Image (cartoon, grey):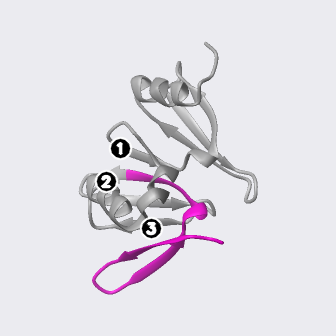
Amino acid sequence: MEKYVYFNSRDTLFRIALSRIAYFEADKNYTNLYLTSGQKLVFTFGLGAMKTHLEAHMKKDTLRFVRIGKSLIINPDYVYKIDLLKQTLQLYDEATGKLFTLSAAKSALKELKELYGTNK
């Protein structure tokens, strides 16, 4: 059964399936949410507030998302490639064929790589 998260703004309520969220990206006092379809939604609160919202409303499903450094929260189900030298992370959704290439700090990517327990 699909699980959803709700985002409420002054004039709009969004109901989004957790499995369709690729990642969240900080943009100063805003948060951009990218769906696996490529659609971008902008929310008028920062990434820290987004993380708090996810934790408050999703309980154990919060584990579906991983914070990467100061500017990203990703859905680890879509991790395709971690490139430490280029400091990039690629997320890929096989269903839509959508590939996202994100920049991240080497230390954050190294932690993510270790989370997957890969060989060195």
Query: In the rendered view, does 103 fall on the left or right side of 48?
Result: right
Q: Is residue 15 magenta?
A: yes
User: Residue 43, position in %: x, y?
Assistant: 34, 67
Under tag 2, what secondary structure? helix
Q: According to the image, label 1 marks what residue? A: 71
Residue that extends furthest to the top in the rendered view of this protein = 120
Q: Residue furthest bottom?
A: 11
Based on the picture, tell me whether residue 77 belongs to the magenta stretch.
no
Viewer-proximal residue, 63 or 100? 63
Query: Which is nearer the N-term, disc 2 or disc 1?
Result: 2
Q: Is residue 86 above or below residue 32?
A: above
| Quadrant housing residue 33 | bottom left
Q: Main secondary structure of the magenta part?
A: strand
C-alpha separation, residue under disc 3 versus residue under disc 1: 16 Å
Which residue was labeled with disc 2?
Answer: 47
Give me the residue at 45% from left, 27% from top: 111
Q: Quadrant of the C terminus?
A: top right
Amino acid type for the residue under numbered disc 1: Ser
Please tell me how crowded label 3 is: few (under 14), some (14-19), or many (20+) other residues with Cα within 10 Å: few
Task: Answer with left or right where residue 81 lies relative to residue 56.
Answer: right
Q: Do the CB atoms of the residues marked 2 and 1 lie less than 8 Å apart?
A: yes
Type of the residue with mark 3: Leu
Which sits earlier in the primary sequence, circle 3 or circle 1? 3
Q: Identify the residue shown where x is 32% and y is 40%.
A: 70
Residue 41 quadrant: bottom left
Q: Badge 3 is on which residue?
A: 41
Looking at the picture, which amino acid does disc 2 mark?
Leu
Q: Are marks 3 and 2 in contact (CB under 8 Å)?
A: no
The residue lying toward the viewer, choosing from 78 and 105, is: 78
The residue range painted magenta reads 1-25
